[in-house]
Amino acid sequence: MGYRYDAGEVITAMVTPFNEKRDVDYNKAENLVRYLMESGSDAILVAGTTGESPTLTHEEELELLSTVKRATANNCKVIMNASSNCTETACRTAKLAKKEDIDALLAVVPYYNKPNQAGIYEHFSQLAKSTDLPIILYNIPSRTGVNMLPETVAKLAKEYFNIVAIKQSYSDMDMISEMRCLCPEDFSLYSGDDSLTLPMLALGAKGVISVASHLYGKEIKSIIRNFKTGEFKAALNMHKKLFPVFRKLFMAPNPAPVKSVLANRGLIEEYVRRPLVELTELEKYELFTVMDACEIEY
């Protein structure tokens, strides 16, 4: 299958490191980028939900984007989150991000407003017209309160060549099958949940926009590569090993669990911005117990 845009197979939705005062730690962000590049990430998503975008200022987002872009030295794709429940704001972010010479944008279905399918279509239409950057749609009804239907996705993919892919965080496989049937062949589908990567590969997904790739990037890459080369048992075995960890990384609101593990590795501090809170000692014990049981070094 030829893709109209190739963002790679493993895209890491990068956490935003904070210091004790909960200011953005740009030095640790640079170090984290280099670590992710060495551990299997094909692309890095900046200021997504995992990056705590709801609590970042626009100035922080742009400085973080500049930091990440500099740290990659053009050896890794950089994707900017241009999500907003205000269409005008999303378009403005897209134009500002373009100045950093990034590779693509990600944009979520507008949240809180609860637009109907016509409103969702108009939002993404205006965003597509505002930039020539590739756009990855993001459908996550559990957060936005609205589900973007396959017909809407297909209409956008057919009418706007720079709408190139979708991150689908929704476990309804029939809906994903319908999307695969309706959308152009060169339109990419990404799993938005690590635990759904393997089943979605069977429906033609290209890869995953991942949280767990902070910790198991090479192993997640192996699931995808083994599946695509016909080594289905090897892909399934790695999925089964990591599945308990995939689930446990969401034992508390993302990204508190993954930040706790990264802090344990000495890569960042564990701080999250309010209203999120850090893991309790009991939660950390439960998380690390599950990770130890999967018998993969991290």
Image: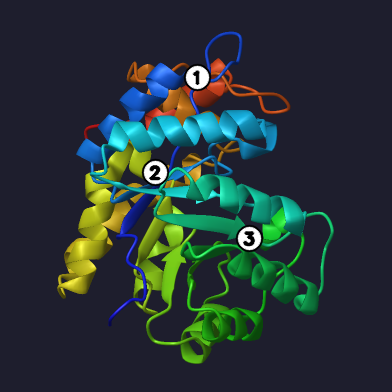
The reply, left or right, for residue 159 in relation to residue 286 is: right
Q: Which residue lies furthest to the bottom in this view?
A: 181
**Which of the two marks, 2 or 3, is nearer to us in this view?**
3
The N terminus lies in quadrant: bottom left
Point out the tag, 2 or 3, that comes first from the N-terminus. 3
Residue, disc 3: 140
Image spot of residue 251 (x, y percent): 56, 38
Point out the tag, 2 or 1, that comes first from the N-terminus. 2
Q: Residues within 10 Å of mark 1 (few under 14, many from 20)?
A: many
Q: Image quarter for residue 145?
A: bottom right
Image spot of residue 80 (x, y percent): 50, 48
Q: Residue type at mark 2?
A: Ala
Secondary structure beneath label 1: loop
Q: How far apart are marks 1 and 3 (CA)?
A: 25 Å
Q: Image quarter for residue 276?
A: top right
Q: Residue type at mark 3?
A: Ile
Q: Distance between the residues labelled 2 and 3?
A: 18 Å
Q: In this view, does 262 lie above or below 160?
A: above
- Please tell me which residue lies in front, 8 or 145: 8
As drawn, the label of residue 212 is: 2
The C terminus lies in quadrant: top left
- Please tell me which residue lies in front, 44 or 229: 44
Q: Residue type at mark 1?
A: Glu
Q: Which residue is drawn at 47% across and 36% down?
A: 65
Residue, disc 1: 270
Q: Residue at x 59, y 69 (%)?
A: 128
